Image (cartoon, rainbow, N blue to C red):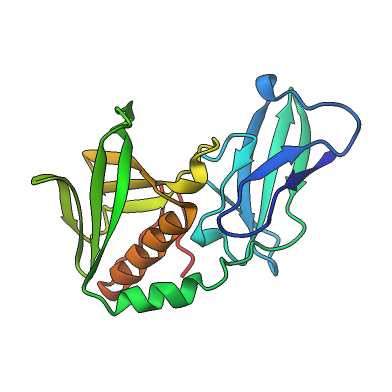
Amino acid sequence: MRRDAARGLQCLGSILRIVSQGSTTMDFSSTSIQWFRVHPKESNKEIISGATKSVYAPEPHDVGQYLEAEINFGGEIATAKTAGPIDPDAGLVDYVETLVRKRETEFNVVVLQLNGIDQPKESVHVLNVGKLRMRLSKGKTVVAKEFYSSSMQLCGVQGGGEAASQAMFWRPRNDLSMVLAFETTRERNTAIMLTRRFAIDCNIILAGPGDKTPW
């Protein structure tokens, strides 16, 4: 088994890239990749559904965990792992706690995908994160408004790409899903953490497709 490396700042808000430890350049065009979360004190790995690219942007669920990628080169398996657990974004937890005391918080976002279909990127929407529900609107038009429920899913975008650290996957209900891009990586992570905190207060645990709940 080959061992490569996951390079990049190992903290929330960064982007990790798989790089070769040897002198050869890695060609990912004919490989399959899968990223995992690995608990520091456990040997079992949790698959990160949809994280199948050579780059990965950690999201709040990854804090305190190692990240590992398995690369399959036509039957030969290589692994790339972070040198340590993913660190939190300094000051972010305290900032989210100040927002929890507010009834709701608004974020400017762009809808990148709607039910898997790419959308025009010039249209800015407002995502409202409240204590009981979330609402996405453009002007007076409400695109989605849903109370926190067991059918809702939410996570950082796991498919890779340079903008992944600023994008969030949200499935308000079974027949509607979207990818939202925030103005900054910090805003994306703030929205995810705040939403999950409000959802927990409603006895709902929000995670991504296929994710195990970490609480």
Residue found at x 36% / y 78%: 98
208 to the left or right of 130: right
Q: For the N terminus, give its image quadrant.
A: top right
Residue 154 vertical placement versus 124 (above, below): below
Residue found at x 32% / y 76%: 100
Task: Tell me residue 84's x, y (percent).
Answer: 74, 62
- The residue lying furthest to the right in this view is 23
Q: Which quarter of the figure has residue 26?
A: top right
Task: Tell me residue 30's x, y (percent).
Answer: 68, 19
Task: Tell me residue 140's x, y (percent).
Answer: 8, 46
Q: Which quarter of the figure has residue 83?
A: bottom right
Decide which of 44, 90 is in the foreground and name it.
Answer: 90
- The residue lying furthest to the top in this view is 30
Decide which of 194, 184 is in the foreground and name it.
Answer: 184
Residue 108 vertical placement versus 161 (above, below): below
What is the count of numbered marks? 0
5 to the left or right of 98: right
Residue 181 vertical placement versus 213 (above, below): above
Residue 110 vertical placement versus 23 (above, below): below
Q: Specify whether residue 173 is in view.
A: no
Q: Specify whether residue 171 is in view.
A: yes
- The residue lying furthest to the left in this view is 140
Q: Which quarter of the figure has residue 95?
A: bottom left
Task: Tell me residue 46's x, y (percent).
Answer: 58, 53
116 to the left or right of 172: right
Residue found at x 33% / y 73%: 99
Residue found at x 36% / y 67%: 194
